[in-house]
Image: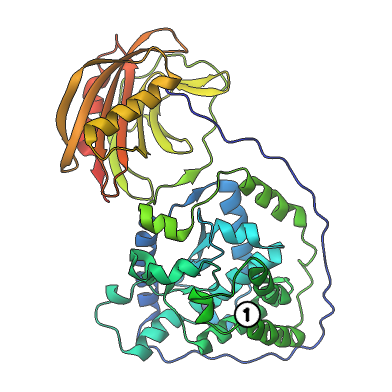
Amino acid sequence: MVSKKRQPLIAWLTLIAIAALPLTTTAQTQIKYHSNRFSVQDDVKLGRQAAQEAEQQFPLLNDEQVRGFVESVGRRLVNAIPQQFQHPEFNYYFKVVNARDINAFALPGGPMYVNRGMIEAAKTEGEMAGVMAHELSHVALRHGTAQATKSQKYGTLAAIAGIAGAIVTRNPGVGQLAQAPFAVYLLKFSREYETEADVLGAQIMARAGYDPRDLANMFRTLEQQGGGGGGFLSDHPSPSDRYVRIDREAQMLRVESANVQRDSRDFARIQERLHGYPRAPTMAEIAQNGQRYPVGESTSYPNSVPTGRVEYPSSRYQSVSIFGNGVQVSVPSNWRQLNESNSVWFVPEGGYGQVNGQPVFTHGVNFGVAQTNSRNLQQATNELINSLAQGNSSLRTSGGYQRTTISGRQGLWTSLSNVNEATGRPENIKLITAQLRNGQLFYMIAVAPQSERNFESAFQNVLRSLRIND
Ligand SMILES: [Zn+2]
């Protein structure tokens, strides 16, 4: 049952590589650490905590090609961090947030989050790398804990957990985010720290084989895209000051030429791929809606009708986190996870396939979140059933609603019947719904052929294990 639209296929774009790097001198500005009462391990610990929270609040883009590309740029920059600012304890990693604002932030100890809007706005790979190099510099220089040391605000470690630098944003609404939970991640650094991150960022760029002036160019791009007014930008050194400063540093740097000739088609391909996704929400919209569920690449399905021959659900269960840790659930260990663009399936082998380009399922559970007009649980559930019935004409409710409890909150249990469009066999569907705090409707759909009762106890176990952290 349940067919869903797939992402459109991506058209590939070709661009011409640009290389203009006549840089010769080797002097460069010396940068030193600021005093810091925290240990390097504290940076790691704080960053890890903050990353967990960030991932509950930001919708990640689950697209391994895009993330992998950002990671490859990030690795190249990390490897170019000067020796004295390298920390073997740090664990740099890179994730993409499905948000429109042109922004990126990094947390102490290494986690970095790059907004999709930033990747889309950058004119070149170098411009994107520039923002990342700036953010990496805050991390390498341990600016978060240095600032906490200076401002004497250290009480508990958790109180300063959200220490990061957001380099740039064109969203004037960021000021409003001060009350939003993740405002803490957008903590501002002093101008001195910002300048240091620009300077070290330029040095890292050059060492990695990028033109450091691309970091400066990104400020131009930003201004062109409507930045400049209000909000975060106004609290920072003006983009033109930063441009001048970075450009001056760039003249002192020698670009490592080994990797300079990089194929710009890779970056064009990633941008084109992103254009194929629905419009990303802004941070302000994310804050308002409490949206924090990942969207992105669908799993690919075998191009065949499901066999319907499946193993019994294993009596061993494994615990998994889905929706950016928003939901935890235990599922039989012989089921596999399949990500759709807005929902997640757990299915046994043989219980899924593809018919006429649409994924179809005969056995398994599906978790998702729906936007409904009603805040009344039963009415919202009816809206969901109606939308499911549009893609499944044989879907019928069979029996009324039963109240149940899901992760400590009120839930509804609805039984439905259907005829599977792929196999033609009658199937039972359980729909379990509950409201999230932001008003959206969380649902679990469990499906199995009517003749196979052995799945029911597995469904019950899955439901009992469900934990929603909203
Ligand atoms: Zn910064």
Q: Is residue 63 above or below residue 56?
A: above
The quarter of the image holding the N terminus is: top left
Residue 46: quadrant of the picture: bottom left
- Place of residue 40 in the rendered image (x, y in percent of width and height, measured from the top left): 40, 79
**Residue 107 can be seen in this image:** no
- Quick one: 228 or 13, which is closer to the camera? 228
Query: Is the residue at mark 1 in contact range of ligand 1, meaning its CB lies under 8 Å from it?
Result: no
Residue 249: quadrant of the picture: bottom right
Q: Is residue 24 above or below residue 377?
A: below
- What type is the residue that disc 1 sits on? Pro
- Quick one: 75 or 446, which is closer to the camera? 446
- Place of residue 301 in the rendered image (x, y in percent of width and height, measured from the top left): 53, 27
At horizontal 45% and vertical 13% (from top left) the residue drawn is: 421
- Place of residue 246 in the rendered image (x, y in percent of width and height, measured from the top left): 68, 83
At horizontal 66% and vertical 52% (from top left) the residue drawn is: 271
Neighbourhood count class around disc 1 (C-alpha, 10 Å): few under 14, some 14–19, many 20 upward: many
Name the residue that disc number 1 marks. Answer: 239
- Place of residue 134 in the rendered image (x, y in percent of width and height, measured from the top left): 58, 75
